[in-house]
Image (cartoon, rainbow, N blue to C red):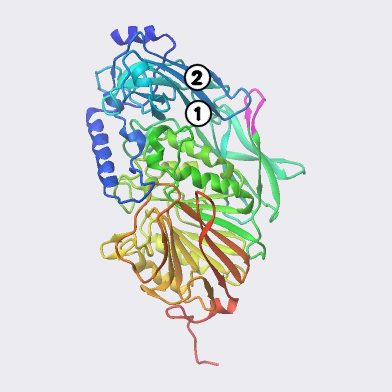
Amino acid sequence: MAETSRLKHLGSQKFGQMEGYSFLSVKVVLVLVLLVQFTAADHSHKKHAGDGVQPLSKIQIHRAVYELHENASVKAYPVLLGTKGEDSQWVTIEVASPKPAEDDWLAVFSPADFNSSTCPPTDDREVAPNICSAPIKYRFANDSNAGYTKTGKASLKFQLINQRADFSFALFSGGLSTPKLVAVSNSVSFVNPNVPLYPRLAQGKDWNEMTVTWTSGYNINKAVPFVEWGLKGEAQIRSPAGTLTFPRGSLCGPPARTVGWRDPGFIHTSFLKDLWPNSLYTYKLGHKLSNGSYIWSKSYHFKSSPYPGEDSLQRLVIFGDMGKAERDSSNEYADYQPGSLNTTDTLIKDLDNIDIVFHIGDIVYANGYISQWDQFTSQVEPIASNVPYMIASGNHERDAPGTGSFYDGNDSGGECGVLAETMFYVPAENRAKFWYSTDYGMFHFCIADSEHDWREGSEQYKFIEKCLASADRQKQPWLIFAAHRVLGYSSAQWQDGAFGEPMGRESLQKLWQKYKVDIAFYGHVHNYERTCPIYQNQCVNTEKSHYSGTVNGTIHVVVGGGGSHLSAFGPVQTSWSLFRDSDFGFVKLTAFNHSSLLFEYKKSNDGKVYDSFTISRDYKDVLACVHDGCEPTTLAT
């Protein structure tokens, strides 16, 4: 009754929703948080270091208690967002507190209700307000308000994106570890929280197929999803979309099943088939409601893929470990993913010169806080809605104890691959096994899943060999291998006597050599490094900037500086490491024709080239016999 009367006193001030959990589960969450913090402390970094800890995991929201004060207030405006069709908008929050303190903080909750009445009955906590959901973002009250601790007044701005629910803002004292709820704002919401948003393109299983995946609040019993599309300036057609979602029970542990849970909405994918090569298409997302009316997204466009082997200018970008960041400076993302927005914005500026993007693992770093996936898809929408955005699985997407991941940690925060497999499409035979091949013109890509067994004799090893062997090098001379973890070479990762993952090169290097892989890319280590063409720990070519002739070794590239806190290099200067940079950046490959490839490493802060090389060769050079890479011959005539 006491809690009910307090809520009535708040009037329209609301609290949010999330599955509860037992005291035992709470202890598990706390242990996991401590483990993450301990692991992060073990990293050594240079400038822009960051602490490597998911900011939302620092909030001990289950410890929150009431400290409501009649003279404290939080007011949010405007209350209605998206009145002109926007899918993001800035909101101003006016805070007043009679007892201001330096560690006061403001949380954004969505849905706006977050009181214990919405917690499942399994929640056995008794201390009000029994908040069982983490906020989606937060800021300290004295941010941009240096006088807050003296005046008790602050004005902050948050950028909100449409996430299928309303929002409220709560003022807490006591810092993140012992939060005390002081005041709650009015709710704010978008005009239509269910609209189709954040399209992300991906290559289909055929070269002339493009997939479009997006998120909405409409299940199929409320509206039928589809894409209206066609060649620019010509008649448009409609293609149906499939709809997926997942319940809390599909996730594998905390915080994804506890304080990190948030309804993911509905994820739709449509398959646009029989595309003309190198052609400009327009499209928009649609939902037909049961009353016959339509809900539309804005219009987008993309250029279809070239025919495999087509001789034309082809440009791709590849990086790993970007994560997300907040343009309103909330969530301390300057410490968590400090380079993410720089990478995103630099790619957007150069988008007219990019044909396809590969983000090879550690996509969001949500670590079990489901709300962060919406925010990431919003951040990359200007890229992913215009060019294929191909992803690979990393430890922060897949790893969860006892779930079949090759590494048994909980880097995914209980997500166990569910979010990555649902939110993005990849042309895999089984999306729970995140390995696949894809073609783009003169390129053939073999994308491995480093979070599943890749050793010789495994199912994935057989896929990797089949993928490499299937490349028609006369038509597709540029053969690329990619995985999240460093299955090749990195002088920043010294582990069990190997520079890279133990057993990685032991199992795979004979395949790279046999099938003459040009370049192998990795993330996981948050920096940039390029090796010489190498086989069995030995450089097979003394050249550093221009390679020509026989393919006698694979160049290994770590490109994990997409945005997450940076990694330092180890003390050993290896003979095979040609260029190292502990900064944020990405790689761009440009194929001019079947004989000429340009490699460029660019920094995210300015988009300028800091390392490069070229490859020039003919088909006969690919066919040439090299050590452990010769086709069998016979003396028979």
Instruction: Residue 397: tell me if it is visible.
Output: yes
In what quadrant of the picture does the N terminus appear? top left
Callout 2 secondary element:
loop
Q: Is residue 72 above or below residue 355?
A: above
Q: Residue at x 50, y 29 (%)?
A: 159
First in sequence: mark 2 vs mark 1: 1
In-front residue for pair 386/245: 386
What type of secondary structure mainly makes up the magenta span?
strand
Mark number for residue 188?
Answer: 2
Residue stretch in magenta: 287-297
* Picture coordinates of residue 254, whole percent (x, y): 31, 36
Q: CA distance from mark 2 to mark 1?
A: 10 Å
| Residues at marks 2 and 1 touching, judged by CB atoms closer than 8 Å | yes
Establish if 304 lies above or below 31: below
Residue 269 in view: no
Going by the numbered disc 2, the residue's amino acid type is Val
* Residue 161: image location, x then y, percent: 52, 30
Question: Can you identify the residue that label 1 sits on?
Answer: 160
Residue 125, labelled with which disc? none
Give SS at disc 1.
Answer: strand
